[in-house]
Structures are given as C-alpha cells and as structure tokens.
Image (cartoon, rainbow, N blue to C red):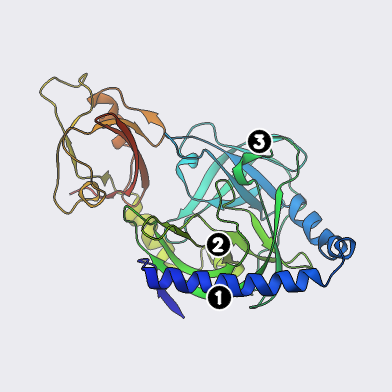
Amino acid sequence: MTNKYFISRWTATGFLCLALCVTNMAVAMAQSIAPTDLNAVFRDAIEIGQKRSVKVYGATAGRVDGYASGIIVSPDGKILTMQGVFLEGSNLRVGLADGTIHEAVVLRRNRELQIALLQIAASTPDYFEITDADVADKGDWVVALSNAFKVADGDEPLSVNLGVVTLRTTMHARLTPRDVAFSGPMVLIDAIISNPGAAGGPVVTQEGLLVGMIGKVINSSDTNTRLNYAIPTSALYDFIHDRKPDVAEHAVVESRPGDLGIHLFRLGGVRSPAYIDRVRENSPASEVGLKPDDLIMHINGHKIATVNDYDRVLSEIRAGDEVILVVARGDKVIRIPLIAVEKQ
C-alpha cells in the first residue's frame, strides 16, 4: 500500500477514524487486565528498551529542538537516531542509560528516511541486533520509549508509551511549508509518540524485540494532523549495512555545493546585515515563501549577523541538506525549513 502524504482533509479524517477505532480496542483490552498484571506483561520489554536507548543532544536553531532520542545498534558505540538540525553543531553528545555523556560524530545519513548513524567512543554491550526481518503485525501490542520533551537529562529513565500497531504502509512525503521530506516504509501506531524529542526512540514488542525506530514528526498545518509511526527494522538494516544502491547515489548528490535560491542585498559590503534582495523563481526559497527584505538571523543554529556570515555558513551546505532558517519579517520572527538543491 502506498500513500502520498500531500495531506488532504480526507486523508486526515481517514487516519483519525483509524486511530480512534484502534484506540477504543486497545482501551477495551487494557481494561480486561488488572494494573499489576499489565505492569508485569510489559516490564521486561521496558527494561530491555531502557538499556538500549540513548538521549541525543545537539545544536538548536530558533525554536527548533536541539535534542532527540536514539537506539544502540552495536557493541562498539554505534547509535541510530533521526536526521535534524541538532546534528549540525560541534557539540553533539549522547547520554547513555547509566547517565554518562559522550561526544558523538555523524557517520552517515539518509535523507529519504530522515535517519542518521552516530558513533561514540564507548563500549555499549546492551544493544539491539538489527535484522532484515520485520517484527509485529497489525493489532500487536508495542511499547515506545523516548526522551519526549527532554524530561530525562541525566540517568532518569525514558518516557514510555503503550500502543497497538495499526498498519504497515509506505509513505512518500515532500518538503513544503507544511511537511517534511520522507520516503519509505513505516509502521503506524495508535500511541501518541509524535512529540518533540521522541524521534529516534525504540518501539518494541512485549518480548522486547525491536519493531522499529520512532520517526521524525510529519505533520500538516492545514489539517493539524501528525503521524505516529516507526521506521521498521528492515529499512534500518538496509541503511546500517548500506544495502540499497540509491543510498550511495544520494551521497554523491549531497556532496555537491548547496544553493537556496537567495540573493542578498550587498551594496553595503560583506559587513552589512543579511537582508534578502531577491528570491530566485522555482528555488527552495521561493517554494517556502521567503521574501525580499526578510532578514536572515540564523542558519542551522549559526548566528547570521552579516552578509559575510551568510556566505561562510552557506559554503558548508551541500545539496540535499536540510536547512533551518530563522528570519525576521517586520515584527515577526519566523522559522522556515527547506532543502538545499545543487548549486547551478
């Protein structure tokens, strides 16, 4: 089954009805189990997930969250998490379950799935063994763990959500002013896991088997709709082992210099504020509604005080990179995400 997530009111209603129906079923099932029994049923799964999950801290940009969750996927410190602006800073850190904090580096990314592989210099004996076999079917109970809203800063346990798998599907979403880029398989879940900081956390079965990793927030401002989903283990396996040929192709494209389609007002020299003079037609900037006289204040967490600052930061952006601009327009400050294209 393939869906085009150019969200319409019809699709939003369909997802809402599906979620409500399955939620009612989940509540009915939960009410048939005594609270003490319910704790016992999921205790092992929660313990397994907590030991193999991490907290990821990085850069912030305007109102963009500088934190996420992650899962340990090897004994030598490899971590899977979500792609985002928080990975762009020089102070990327990973917090383990024992409360220790370790510096991290990005090994690889995949823009279609919006995921990234990190490395820390630490032994991680408790980890998820990622396989190419998908786990859990529609109607199965699952537990989702994450550092939603950054409520756990030290060795505190992650937040836990209990839910049911509602559907396995494939989604193709594009980057517009309303949506994020995502293309690939997903497992829809009726639990509310699409929250700041939750992306990158594990979703496990009652037995503690990994179902997938909580996905990046996909929402529509038109319908106020979010998808609660996980990226399945088979897709994670392909990414870790670089099995899909298009991953390498994307890497080649993303290594080329990036362009946003913005021309700054430069008559005052490189020390002038970074005001937009004009926006190229059919460019990333025009698609997200940037306008002449917008003042660029931040790019991916970097303060932009002058034209020179803009040029310096832009020179490090590659085609395919996710870019978060914070601009001043009149008396408003606006956060605008866009994807850089190949420089012409």
Real-space Cα separation, disc 3 to disc 2, in angstroms: 29 Å
The residue sitting at 33% across, 41% down in the picture is 317
**Which residue in the protein does label 1 denote?**
168
81 lies left or right of 303: right
- Residue sitting nearer the eye, 88 or 178: 178
The residue sitting at 45% across, 71% down in the picture is 13
Nearest to N terminus: mark 1 or mark 3: 3
Q: Residue 144 in the image: state x and y as whole percent.
A: 67, 58
Real-space Cα separation, disc 2 to disc 1, in angstroms: 12 Å
The residue sitting at 36% across, 58% down in the picture is 222
- Residue sitting nearer the eye, 221 or 229: 221
Residue flagged by tag 1: what amino acid is it? Arg
Nearest to N terminus: mark 2 or mark 1: 1
**Which residue in the protein does label 3 denote?**
102
- For residue 281, above or below residue 187: above
Residue flagged by tag 2: what amino acid is it? Asn
Q: Which mark is residue 284?
A: none
Nearest to N terminus: mark 3 or mark 2: 3
- Label pair 3/2, CB-CB below 8 angstroms: no
- For residue 6, above or below residue 79: below
**Which residue in the protein does label 2 denote?**
228
Q: Residue furthest bottom?
A: 1
Asked if one can make out residue 78 in the rendered structure from this viewpoint, the answer is yes
Q: Residues within 10 Å of mark 3 (few under 14, many from 20)?
A: some
260 lies left or right of 145: left
Q: Marks 2 and 1: which is nearer the front? A: 2
Callout 2: SS = loop
322 lies left or right of 67: left
Callout 1: SS = strand
